[in-house]
Amino acid sequence: MRRGRRSVLATCLVLAIAVAPHAVLAQTVDELYASGVKARQAQHFDEAADLFRRALALKPDNADALVQLGFAELGRNDLTAARDAFSKALSLAPTYRDASFGMAEVEFRSGNPDAALRLAESVAQADPGNADARTLIENIRKARQAGQLKPVPAAATPAKEPPRRRADPVPGLMEQGRHLRAAGKLPEAEKAYRSALKLAPRNTDILVALGLVVGSSQRFDEAGHFFDQALAIKPGLLDARLGKVRLAIWQGDAPHARALVDGVLATAPNNVEALDLDARIALLEADYTRAEQSFQRVLAVDPRNAEALVGIGDVRRAQGDDDAAREAYKQALAIEPGSADVEQRLAVPPPRKWRLDVGSEVSDLTNGLRDWTDSSAGLAYRLSPRTTISGRTRVATRFGHTDVQIEGRIDQAFSPAFSAYALAAATPDADFLARYSIGAGGSWQVVAPAKAFGPLSLNIDARYDNFANTDVTSISPWVQGYILDGRLGLSARWVHAQDDIGTRADGYVLRADLAVTPRFNVFGGYADAPEIDDGALIPTRTIFGGISFDVSDPLTLRASIAHEQRPTFDRSIFGLGLTARF
């Protein structure tokens, strides 16, 4: 009997010993997390780190536990372990502000004040009431002013060296990509981001960064795919939505960009990046009042926002105030010394508001007819970025008669996509030119510039000429498009003319313009269209071509040649001209 009791007692003891450890470890993730927080707040950092690691063993994707572990490791002064914890938290939740703040602390203590300041400022912008972020920003700026750029040394060597952990390479690759992109090295930046994506294929930060780099390389469809991938993982992700706004801006699709940014501002009205993009879109729309208001709202939140100051400069320059634009650019450069973007804007010479065009043609006629000459001089002045006025004098000789024509013209851009002009001309004592003429026209850009194709514009010219014996009305709609990255322009024009007795004539003009180099251009074409000669509609076939060369930024030289076939004679035309801007 006693032997049986001893056997039962021994069995119970063995079971108790076997179960005891599991009973001790049978704490929930929430219990371990709560205990870890209490330990960290009591500055028992070793105990806190152990509790958070046990919680993560049960639930590895607990971003809260990772952030708390990062702060515990900061308390132990183990910056490598803290960086690892915050990086993992950000890979799970890229907008986790506490994780970004913790990473800012790590960068600051590691002697990386620039990276620390960017992170801390992003936290402060997203949460203006975050006193810790503001304090850290002040400390970073004080340290920079004092020249304290070395890593903060450990207060004391821990009694027990923390276990060595393999650092997560993703944050380093991301930082490398950011630096390369800022330096304009887009292929190298893309390579770094793609390496990071292989390690963390569901990291939305990497997907957004890749979208921005690929979009900057004008691979717009591929960039949109990266943004869509990020949104599929995290619907409504702000960074991806803003990336799509930038993509629409790069493609010149202002209406789509406007719709996208308005959607973002409806949910995040004070988001600095959204406001900046809203202003950029307003610039595309030539709505300078809205653009300035949005940039000023950015500066109200962040007075040291260099991008907003650059935007203010762009608004001033678009309004024709180059001095005010340069002042804004200089303020931006003081905040970001060495910025290639700002320096490039400052390097742009002041706008030249005057333009002088001088040209002369000599025509050799067959059948023993005397040469014709046709010379002109025109002067244009840009009243504003949208308005230009010009005047031109033309002197032409034909068959021993000379006519002098004076013309005035005004060009007005109503938007970046639509412009129009109107002109009037008069010829005192006209022999063969029109006694007076009036004309108008317009141009509408229906397709914005893109890398492979565009812009594409629809145009129209209309003119009424009053001659001594007749009146002629002509109308000429035409289309012009560009391919090969804008280097090759193709145009097709229909010409319709009618005099006051009902005589009609129709024809067409085809032309190609090619930019051989940035400074050297050639053109050529063919026309089968009526020529208005002393009020008569003469059927004419013409082949023509020419070149232009930019000797310098303000000076361009031109030369042209053409051959006409008329019913009664042929005409060969040789022309020279120049354009000077000042």
Image (cartoon, rainbow, N blue to C red):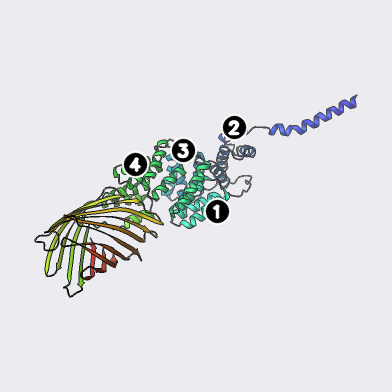
| Cβ atoms under marks 2 and 1 closer than 8 Å | no
Badge 2: how crowded within 10 Å, few (<14), some, or many (20+)?
some
Residue at the limit of the structure toward the top, as seen here: 1
Name the residue beneath numbered marker 2.
34
Question: Who is closer to the viewer here, 52 or 254?
Answer: 254
Figure quadrant of the C terminus: bottom left
Under mark 1, the amino acid is Ser
Give the residue at mark 4.
294
Label 4 secondary element: helix
Determine whether, in the image, residue 97 is placed left or right of residue 365: right
Residue contact at pointers 3 and 2, CB within 8 angstroms: no
Mark 2 vs mark 1, foreground winner is 1
Q: Nearer the viewer, mark 3 or mark 2?
A: 2
Pinpoint residue 564: horizontal percent, then vertical percent: 25, 68
Question: Relative to residue 219, is residue 351 drawn left or right?
Answer: left
On the image, the x and y values in percent for residue 517 come to 35, 66
Secondary-structure class at tag 2: helix
Observer-nearest of 286 and 36 = 286
Q: CA distance from mark 4 to mark 1?
A: 37 Å
Q: Residue 195's mark?
A: 1
Give the crowd class for mark 1: few <14, some 14-19, many >=20 residues within 10 Å. Answer: some
Indicate which disc, 3 or 4, sits on the residue closer to the N terminus: 3
What amino acid is at disc 3? Asp
Residue 176 seen in the current view: yes
- Looking at the picture, tell me which residue is in the foreground, 151 or 542: 542
Dot 3 corresponds to which residue?
A: 132
Dot 4 amino acid type: Ser
Q: How much space separates mark 3 and mark 4, taking CA atoms?
A: 28 Å
Q: CA distance from mark 2 to mark 1?
A: 37 Å
Label 4 close to label 1 by CB (< 8 Å)? no
